[in-house]
Structures are given as structure tokens and as C-alpha cells.
């Protein structure tokens, strides 16, 4: 607050605009970043962007047993799920790295109504 007890609205608006620009930049960086998850010692690799969308899947031919297609199909399904989960974990870490500092700049959790947001219900 400035002397006289009045908020500088212009300063608050500028700060909000800077935070919004930083948020958009971080979201774009997440969209442009790709992480990998693997399973089966690298037999299956899932590529996922920073927003959690699967962008690619690679299955090593060594994972396929032509003499037992039913078992191979079941095993591949398990490996694909495991690789996607591994990539999802990497995305969560990436999101925390990119978005965490922005949430801290909002006073804590960064979600209105939750503790850490001064002046908001629940704070």
C-alpha cells in the first residue's frame, strides 16, 4: 500500500500482466517439450509432450515373440502402459519445474481459495 492507504492499481495490473505472460510462456514451453518413458529395459518407449499428450510410441522388434502371439500381445500392452506411466511421471516433474515457481509467485498453491492466497476465501 502507498502512503494514505491506497493501493496502486496500475502497479497491481502490471504485476498481474507480467505473471500472465510468464504463465503463457511456461505453458508454451511445456507444449514444445517432449519427454520419454521406457519399459522392459527399453523395449517400449513412449514420447509425451509437456502437456501429457502421447506423441510417439516405439516398440523394439525384440519384444515380439512370433511363436506366442497371444502372450506377446498381453506383454506388449503391459509394456506400453508402463512406458506411458513412466513418461507421465517425467511430465509431472517437468510441469512442477516449470509451473512451480509461478504458483509460488501467487503466494503458495496458486489456486484461488486455497491457503496461501491472502485475501481469498479459505486463506
Image (cartoon, rainbow, N blue to C red):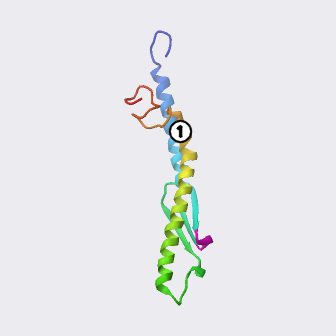
Q: Horizontally, is 3 left or right of 42 in the view?
A: left
Q: Position of residue 40 (x, y in %)?
A: 59, 72
Name the residue: 48% across, 80% down. 73
Extreme residue in the bottom direction = 67
Q: Position of residue 59 (x, y in %)?
A: 56, 75
Looking at the image, residue 119 lies above or below residue 33: above
Name the residue: 51% across, 38% down. 103
Magenta residues, dominant SS class:
helix
Residue nearest the viewer, comparing 123 with 91: 123
Describe the element under mark 1 as helix, strand or loop.
helix
Tell me which segment is drawn in magenta. 39-43
Residue nearest the viewer, comparing 13 with 91: 91
Extreme residue in the right direction = 41
Q: Position of residue 2 (x, y in %)?
A: 50, 14
Looking at the image, residue 36 lies above or below residue 96: below
Q: Is-magenta flag for residue 41?
A: yes
Name the residue: 52% across, 58% down. 88
Extreme residue in the left direction = 121
The total of numbered circles placed on residues is 1
Q: Is-magenta flag for residue 92?
A: no
On the rendered image, what quadrant is the C terminus found in? top left
Q: Horizontally, is 61 left or right of 110 in the view?
A: right
Q: Position of residue 49 (x, y in %)?
A: 53, 58
Residue, disc 1: 102
Amino acid at each position: 500500500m502507498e502512503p494514505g492507504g491506497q493501493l496502486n492499481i496500475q502497479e497491481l495490473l502490471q504485476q498481474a500482466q507480467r505473471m500472465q505472460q510468464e504463465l503463457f510462456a511456461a505453458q508454451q514451453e511445456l507444449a514444445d517439450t517432449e519427454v520419454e518413458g521406457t519399459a522392459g529395459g527399453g523395449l517400449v518407449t513412449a514420447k509425451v509432450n509437456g502437456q501429457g499428450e502421447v506423441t510417439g510410441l516405439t516398440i523394439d522388434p525384440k519384444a515380439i515373440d512370433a511363436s506366442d502371439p497371444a502372450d506377446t500381445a498381453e506383454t506388449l500392452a503391459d509394456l506400453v502402459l508402463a512406458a506411458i506411466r513412466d513418461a507421465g511421471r517425467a511430465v509431472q516433474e517437468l510441469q512442477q519445474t516449470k509451473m512451480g515457481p509461478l504458483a509460488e509467485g501467487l503466494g503458495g498453491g496458486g489456486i484461488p481459495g486455497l491457503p496461501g492466497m491472502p485475501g481469498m476465501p479459505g486463506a
